Amino acid sequence: MHDIGMLADLVVVFGCAAAVVYACHRLNQSPIVGFMITGTLIGPYGFSLVHDLDSIHTLATVGLMILLFSLGLEYSLKKLMETRIAVLLAGPLQTLGTGAVVMLIARQAGASDRAAIVYGMLVALSSTAVFMKMLSDRGEIDSVHGRIGLGIAIFQDLATIPFMVAIPLMAAEEAVFGSIAVSVAKAALLILGVLVVARYVFPLILRGILKTHSKELFLIAAIFLFLGTALASAKAGVSLALGSFLAGLVLSESDYGQHLFAEVRPFRDGLNSLFFISLGMLVDPAFIARNVGSVLLITAAVILGKTLLTTAAVAASRIPLHPALFAGAALAQIGEFSFVLLQAAAAAGIVGAGPYQILLACSVVSMV
C-alpha cells in the first residue's frame, strides 16, 4: 500500500505540474516558476494533496544531484577559458560585491554576523537554469551579454564550494580558524583527487565500455561514476550536491562528455522538476500573505540592486554598457543553489523560520 500511496502522490504531483506549467507557458513564464507554484499549491501549506513527503523529497534530492551533474557536464574547463574575463574578473566582483553589500545591510537591520554572511551568500547567487532558459528562448546564448553572463554564472556556481564548506562551520559556537582551514583543505584535496582520477582513470573505463557498443552498459557505467563521486564527496564531509557537480565537471573533460550529457538530459528534465516542486512545498502562503509588503519590498531591492551591481562588475571588465546592463538584468534573480544553502543554514540554526520563509518567497518572486 505504501508503494501505491507514493504512486498516487506522483500522479498528483505531475498532473498538477502539467496544468500549472501549461498556464505559465501561456503567460511566457519559466517552467521553473510553474514547478514552484505547483509545490506551494499541493504541499502541506497549500491543499495538502501530497501525503508521502519524505519520498518526494528523496526523489527531489536525486533530481538536484542530476541537475548539478548535468550542469557540470555543460561547464567544461574549455568553456571556462572561453569566458575567462567573466570568470576571473566580473564573477568575483559581482559575487563578492553583492555579498558584501547585502551583509552590511543585514547587519544594519539587526541580523547577527553569521546570518548576515549567509544572506550575502544567498542573494549573490543567480539562477543558471533560468538564465540559460531565458537566453535560449531569445536566441542570445552566443551574444556578448550571454557569454559574459554565463561566465559569471559559472563563477557563482563554483563559489558555492566554499559556501557549502563554510555554513556547517559557522553553525559551531566556536568556529576557529584552524577548523575552517582543515575543512577547506579537505575540500581542495577532494577536488584535486577527483580531477586526477577523472583525468587518468575515467577515460580508460569509458573507452573500454564504448568498445562494447552497448548503450545500456555505457549509461549504467556513467551513473556508477556519477554516484560514486557524489558518495566519495559525502564520505569526505562535502555535500552530495557538490560531489555531483564535480563529477559532471570532470567527466565533461573526457571525449565522451557530450555523449554523457545527451544520455543524462531526459532524466534531468524529469527529476529536476521534482526538486523545484519540493522547494515550492516549503513556501507558506499564509506567512507570505501576512508579510506581503516585506516580501515585495525585499524582492524589488534584490532585483534592482543585483542589476546595478552586476552591470557595474561587467562594465569594470571593459565590456560596453549595453551588454553589461543586459547581463545584469538577466542575472538579477536568486538562484537554485541559494535554496540548497538556505536549507543548510536553516538546518544549522543560522537562519530563523521567519527570514527562511521570506527568502524562499523572494527567490520565487525574483525568478518570476
Image (cartoon, rainbow, N blue to C red):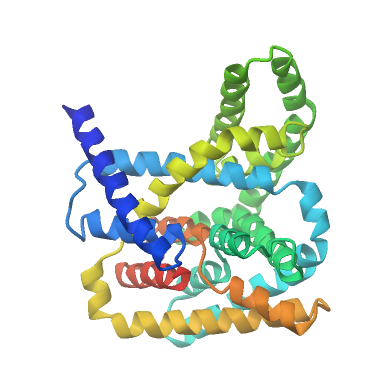
Q: Is residue 196 above or below residue 118?
A: above
Q: Describe residue 122's horizontal placement relative to residue 158 as left or right.
A: left
Return the residue found at the far front: 26
Q: Describe residue 210's horizontal placement relative to residue 354 as left or right.
A: right
The quadrant the N terminus occupies is: top left
The x and y percentages for residue 48 are: 17, 53
In the depicted view, which residue is nearer to us: 340 or 67? 67
User: In which image quadrant can residue 38 be found?
Assistant: bottom left
Q: Describe residue 35's horizontal placement relative to residue 252 as left or right.
A: left
In the depicted view, which residue is nearer to us: 329 or 89? 329
The x and y percentages for residue 74 are: 67, 46
Q: Is residue 313 visible?
A: no
Tell me what residue is drawn at x 49 percent, y 54 percent.
168
The quadrant the C terminus occupies is: bottom left
Tell me what residue is drawn at x 68 percent, y 58 percent.
154
Q: Is residue 318 above or below residue 232?
A: below
Tell me what residue is drawn at x 68 percent, y 32 percent.
259
Q: Describe residue 291's horizontal placement relative to residue 336 as left or right.
A: left
User: In which image quadrant can residue 320 be found?
Assistant: bottom right
Q: Is residue 307 visible?
A: yes
